[in-house]
Amino acid sequence: MSAESVQARSARAGLLPGIGGIDEAGRGPLAGPVVAAVVVLAPGQTIDGVRDSKQLSARQRDWVGLRIEAQARAWAVAFSSVQEIDTLNILQATMLAMQRAVAALDCCPGQLRVDGNRAPELADYRGQLDTLVGGDRLCPAIAAASILAKRARDQHMLELDRRYPVYGFAKHKGYPTAAHREALRRFGPCPEHRRSFRPVRDAMLQAGLAE
């Protein structure tokens, strides 16, 4: 579909011109929530410093994130909890977080692009919904969303580190590093560990805590 036809359809539907990028952070960790973000940019808009969040340091994500929040037409961040991950599975919990992020927008663009090859069901959305593999490298709005999602999740994991200091969440953010696996082996899981993930189940079995 051409840009002109997308804009025309968006105008008829009462949607803003521009693109909303959607991305997530936290599908792979053993602990903590999965986080989704959506960032809406005006047609042709770029924000200085925006690129794939994995290419930025934590400090860079902080200041670029503030710039995104100030300059984007709209943005939102949403979480799916560990309990939702364990109940639904990580893919469906990710889709749920994306749905929540879009629902939290105070205005909706005529086009939404999701990083990867799976998009959430958005029953009330009347614009164009696309997926884009490698979108965090190819689409500025998705790259901006990746930064906000990663930044929000890292901040949440710092809070969890203060509540559960023995696991080292401040360093590894819940990912299955050697240090994290060793802490699981020594202390067993905390309430923020994903019990549907095999390394956590194995730690529970070892500690005699299997459900």
Image (cartoon, helix red, strand yellow):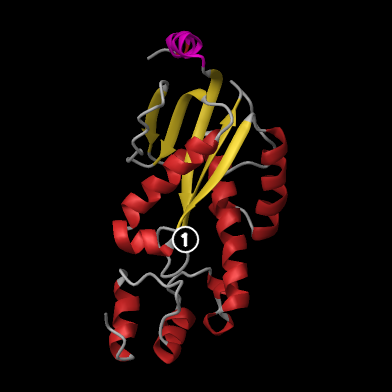
* Identity of the residue drawn at 32% across and 41% down: 118
Q: Which residues are magenta?
A: 4-14
Instruction: Tell which of 101 and 54 is nearer to you.
Output: 101
Circle 1: residue type: Pro
Circle 1 Cα neighbour tier, 10 Å, few/some/many (<14 / 14–19 / ≥20): many
Q: Is residue 119 magenta?
A: no
* Identity of the residue drawn at 59% across and 31% down: 106
Name the residue that disc number 1 marks. Answer: 33
Q: Quadrant of the N terminus?
A: top left
* Identity of the residue drawn at 44% across and 48% down: 97
* Quarter-of-image position of residue 144: top right
Is the residue 8 above or below the residue 166 in the image? above
Residue 53, given in percent of the width and then of the height, sits at 56, 50
Say whether residue 8 is left or right of residue 60.
left
Q: Is residue 11 magenta?
A: yes
Instruction: Tell which of 203 and 85 is nearer to you.
Output: 85
Residue 6, given in percent of the width and then of the height, sits at 44, 14
Q: Is residue 52 visible?
A: no
Q: Main secondary structure of the magenta part?
A: helix
Say whether residue 135 is left or right of residue 57.
left
